Amino acid sequence: MKRFENQVVVITGAANGIGKACAIRFAEEGANIACLDLAEELNDSVAAECRELGAEALALKCNVTDKENIDENVKTIMEKWGRIDVLVASAGIYTGTPLAEVPVEQWQRTIDINLTGTFLTNQAVASILMEQKSGSIINISSMAGKTSWPASAEYSASKSGVIGLTRSVAMEMAPFGPTANAVCPGNTLTEMVRDVAERVGKLDGLTGEKWLQLRANETPMNRLAEPWEIAGVVAFLASEDSRYLTGQAIEVDGGLIMS
């Protein structure tokens, strides 16, 4: 079933991980895809995969901390398709440094990309959705937006901020029809999480694979998520089946926070 035929889906952080999985999922379901990322070669490759699935796709270089760059990209998308139906704000980074060792520049960069970048992309698209009186914004937060752990101050703060931002955006758009929700993934087997495992694992004297296994063991389902599993929830939130659902922060974590 192609739930998003002829719709336009904009995805930041589309070059890999959850963003890439979302691009592929929406392409499979008939959408036109705008892939936004700074990693141009990887981003081009994802757009090419979307075209192989029968979708129209643009690959646009995008720095989510640069308002002018975002606005230029939105203008390009509107010139090509004349509408935007879904924004998936997936661009993000993780650092993982003990609190006493976090340089202020690292704190600021994490906030700039994870939170300000989400704000700027939401801001650029929300007015379009409200004018259309339809559409969805899905912001990728994290289980770190609802809980936390050592060596994650800047990441947890940024992802908590995404949840608060999402609620505010949802409130502003609701009278016009569009929805805004956040997805809070647990540890997901992406390139970023594998990199985190290598770096954070060293703090505990563990290999990356051992760190990932411990995280899986902590999860009631005894495994980590695959990116396509997060993309499925994102697609639901963009679909007609969720039209009365807005302002939510949905945990997709195998039961980890619950436990």
Image (cartoon, rainbow, N blue to C red):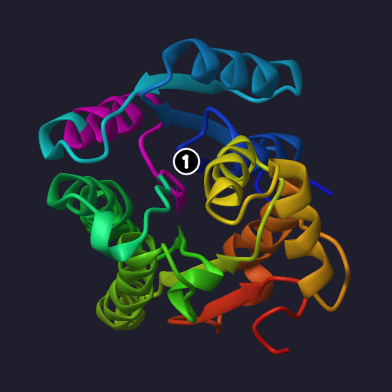
Residue positioned 67% across, 40% down in the render: 21
Mark yes or no: residue 81 visible: yes
Q: Residue 152, image x and y in percent?
A: 41, 63
The amino acid type, in three-letter code, at marker 1 is Ile
Which sits in the foreground, 167 or 223? 223
Residue positioned 40% across, 75% down in the render: 177
Q: Is residue 194 left or right of residue 94?
A: right
User: Which residue is at the far bottom?
Assistant: 258
On whether residue 89 falls in the magenta region, the answer is yes
Residue positioned 69% across, 73% down in the render: 241
Picture quadrant where residue 256 is located: bottom right
Neighbours of disc 1 within 10 Å: few (<14), some (14-19), many (20+): many
Q: Is residue 69 left or right of residue 232?
A: left
Check disc 1 and report the residue beneath it. 11
Residue positioned 88% across, 68% down in the render: 222
On whether residue 22 falls in the magenta region, the answer is no
* Region in magenta: 70-92
